[in-house]
Amino acid sequence: MVPRWTLADRLRKTREEIGMSQKALAQAIGVTQRQVQAAENNEVTPKPFLLMSYAMISNIDLNWIETGEEKPSGPIGPDGEKLPDLDSNQEPSGLQTGGKLLQFTPRQMVETKPLERVA
């Protein structure tokens, strides 16, 4: 069995990922170094403000910081599958093929050949 990281572990890993000391992080988010230290040492339950601050400054998913689980980015279907991202016209913004994202411009869409009728 693989041990799960605690919230304190995830906070510490998040800070280390962006290469900041506890003191630098505390100054950046407007709290004391002691508050950061206490949260990372599992001495207190961090307030939501602190969790959001870690996520915002590190660009790490808040859900992962809070729970240790990653959510797929973008829209999710009823069965939990990832749905395609849509552009402003509610059209798929790209097509996933073989791990490569293909982007289509309006010109490419206009220049496609029309379908032929089958008798």
Image (spheres, rainbow, N blue to C red):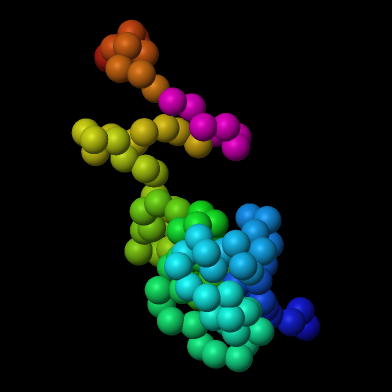
- Residue 28 in sight in this render: yes
Residue 17 picture location, percent across and down = 66, 58
What residue is drawn where x is 58% and y is 81%?
34
Among the 4 quarters of the image, the one containing residue 26: bottom right
Residue most toward the right?
A: 1
Q: Quadrant of the C terminus?
A: top left
Q: Residue at x 40, y 51 (%)?
A: 74
Residue 20, located in which quarter of the rendered image?
bottom right
Q: Please determine whether, in this image, residue 76 is positioned above or below residue 66.
A: above
Q: Is residue 100 magenta?
A: yes
Residue at 74 percent across and 82 percent down: it is 3
Q: Nearer the viewer, residue 81 or 69?
A: 69
Q: Is residue 66 left or right of residue 21?
A: left
Work out which quarter of the rendered image holds the N terminus and state it.
bottom right
Image-based side of 112 in relation to 58, left or right: left
Q: Position of residue 115 (x, y in %)?
A: 31, 15
In this rendering, does residue 61 appear at all?
no
**Numbered label tally:** 0
Could you say which is closer to the camera, residue 24 or residue 11? 24
- Name the spot of residue 81 as percent of width and height, x first: 45, 57
Residue stretch rendered in magenta on the structure: 97-103
